[in-house]
Amino acid sequence: MAGGAGSRFWPISRSAQPKQFLDILGTGKTLLQQTFERFTGIIPKENIFVFTNDMYRGLVREQLPDLPEAQIVGEPVMRNTAPCLAYASHKIAMINPKASIVVSPSDHLVMDNEVFKKDILTALKAASRINTLITLGIKPTRPATDLTYIQYIPKKLESDLYKVKTFADKPTEELATMFYQSGEFLWNTGIMVWSAQSILESLETYLPEMNVIFKEGDSKYNTPAEVPFIQNAYYQCKNIPINLGILEKASNVSVLPGNFTWSDLGTWASVYERSERDYMGNAVIPSERVIMYDSNNCMVNVPEDKLVIIQGLEDFLVAESNNTLLICHKDQEEKVKEIFADVKAKYGNEYL
């Protein structure tokens, strides 16, 4: 899934080029490219589909030149993850009704690729044998309030799977601390594995109206008639995430505790955590033309061709792109969304 807008990373992430298309960690590869390469080590290239907004199809082609154009699938309008996955499930089922499917965000960080591969293959094998919707969870390393938690029943089902008891999205600090300390919760990575049959049955049960919309296109998928059909279908869909639409309702949801290092890179704080830092604790991307004086624990992301001198800052975020400079305290980064809305109200889309 590569269709998100990534407004939390404005001004680096913009509506014309959101987070998944950026080298936000300064690795030399964008998050989309890293995700694609990770899965080519697990799944044949011809079985990988990138679902994105129509406006980003050109960016996907540019960043993944080895991916055939037919496997870059455009959504005409943003409608969250449930319509995207309903579309993908019907389309893939028309190619192979016995398929096992991995769903992954394109803008997350995964390390320990060999461990990740092993966990994905374990989940795929289980999904091909039993009727279950599998989520991959990660043991929390802190009481995060910006993530979704999965509570599970600590009795193993099979293949290292555990039955999911409940989901808790973006808890308060008090609840997050309780979840973290209890040992009964995992972070939800947003990576899901299931068989085409299992997800189609769930769509029919829990999102019947949406399922009918996409089922009508079964004879059109993977033909020239698919695009005009989808242009009409999406506008009939409500905006709903897959968690709310299916996973929080279904009785056959399980979780596989992952053993790899993961971050959703959902905040500048999470990017700072995963970035290389100098001896003063400053993370500077790129670092060639940035000079820091008497500054520490700052997150700096500026154009590589600009000379930037920073003096006397502590715990600040400095980000520049698209003729826009943002300077704010790292502890106040939740205000970026509010600032984004204010800029849009005052200047329209000029700086977005």
Image (cartoon, rainbow, N blue to C red):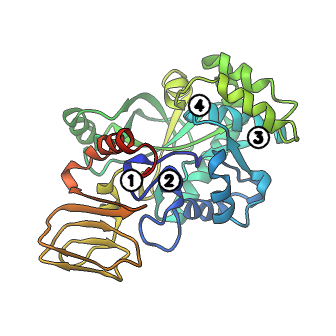
* C-alpha span from label 1 to label 3: 32 Å
- Of labels 1 and 2, earlier in sequence is 1
Q: Amino acid at mark 2?
A: Pro
Left or right for 67, reference 307: right
* C-alpha span from label 4 to label 2: 20 Å
User: Residue at label 2?
Assistant: 18
Asked whether residue 138 appears in the rendered view, the answer is no
User: Residue at label 1?
Assistant: 9
Q: Are marks 1 and 2 in contact (CB under 8 Å)?
A: yes
Helix, strand or loop at label 1? It is helix
Mark 1 or 4: the one toward you? 1
Helix, strand or loop at label 3? It is helix
Mark 2 or 3: the one toward you? 2
Asked whether residue 166 appears in the rendered view, the answer is yes
User: Residue at label 3?
Assistant: 92
- Of labels 4 and 2, earlier in sequence is 2
Q: Quadrant of residue 35?
A: bottom right
Mark 1 or 3: the one toward you? 1
- Of labels 2 and 3, earlier in sequence is 2
